[in-house]
Amino acid sequence: MIYKTIIIEDEHRLREALSIMLEMVSGDSVQIVGYAESVDEAVKMIDRLKPDLVFMDIMLKNGTGFDVLQQISFNAFHLIFTTAYEQHAINAFKYSAIDYLLKPVDPQELKTAIDRIAVLEERVLEKQQITELHTNLSKTPDRIVLPTQEAMYVVKLEQILRCETSGSYTTFFLTDGRKIMVSKPLKNYEDILLQPMFFRVHQSHLINVNSILSYSREGMVHMNDKSVVPISRGKKEQFFKLMKDEI
């Protein structure tokens, strides 16, 4: 399949660099049909050309990529954010982006993001992604999109029993027994996994308080999946207060 592609980027040299890189890593599968530098240009171009794929810089001349997503009428496209700022990652996933790429864009990460689109379509997940885009644009999300090499998993927040991070990877343990590992640190998801449903009891552990079986004053939490999670010394007082307020 050939993906009609729009690049939304306000720096000329970065547009050119991304264009060249796309040609290198995707062959004939990506056809660039337009460029935009500002929010207004991007909205008009997306609605007029109806692309299959959009690369979206977050910081634009007169606003942000998120402003574009709020104003467009056509949104049945795959979305990949590009940004120089790590802190925008959470908002990117709120808008059901395929991926977000930190500048300068790494060719292998770009290729992986393109390949992920094909995997999505093979697994017939495109409709779910579009539905998520509509849902997340209109309200505070009640689910999260977890990107892996194999697929994009749409998971309801209430299905997340706990998260465990190790270096730049995070494993999501779900109530149905599944484990989903993503190549992002836990800090990237804390803006979505908020109290009172979730609490980060330890640098490496975040738990769903609704899935707690028991906990001890010594600082150990027993979860419904029979796992045992430690509470760090610095989190004990806040955790016990939260649990007292929940009772």
Image: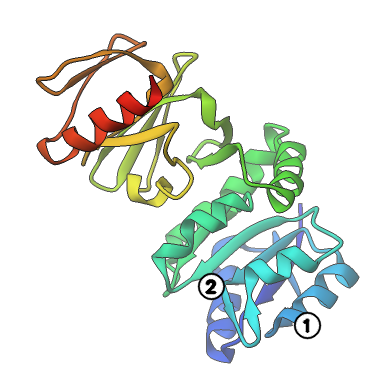
Q: Position of residue 126 (x, y in %)?
A: 73, 41
Q: Is residue 38 left or right of 98 when viewed as pictured?
A: right
- The residue sitting at 74% across, 50% down in the picture is 138
Question: Is 14 placed left or right of 79 in the picture?
Answer: left
The residue lying at 34 percent from left, 35 percent from top is: 199
Q: Horizontal and vertical percent for residue 245?
A: 36, 28
Q: Amino acid at mark 1?
A: Glu
In the foreground, 225 or 103: 225
Going from N to C along the chain, the mark reached first, 2 or 1, is 2
Scheme of colours in the image: rainbow
Mark 2 lies on a secondary structure that is helix
> Neighbour class for label 1 at 10 Å: few (<14), some, many (≥20)?
few
- Give the Cα separation between the discs numbered 2 and 1: 23 Å
Which of the two residues, 130 or 113, is positioned nearer the viewer here? 130
Examine the rendered structure and indicate whether residue 121 appears above or below residue 123: below
Disc 2: which residue: 21
Q: Which corner quadrant holds the C terminus?
A: top left
Residue 200 is left or right of residue 154, and the answer is left
Amino acid type, mark 2: Met
- Residue 27, labelled with which disc? none
Q: Position of residue 172 (x, y in %)?
A: 40, 30
Q: From this viewpoint, which residue is outermost toward the right?
A: 48
Q: Residue at x 65, y 44 (%)?
A: 118
Q: Quadrant of residue 218?
A: top left
Between disc 2 and disc 1, the foreground one is 1
Kindly indicate the quadrant of the structure image that contains residue 130. top right
Q: Position of residue 124 (x, y in %)?
A: 73, 33
Query: Disc 1 designates what residue?
Result: 41
Q: Tell how many labels.
A: 2
- Pick whichever, 72 or 46, lies toward us: 72
**Local crowd at mark 2 within 10 Å, few (<14), some, or many (≥20)?**
some
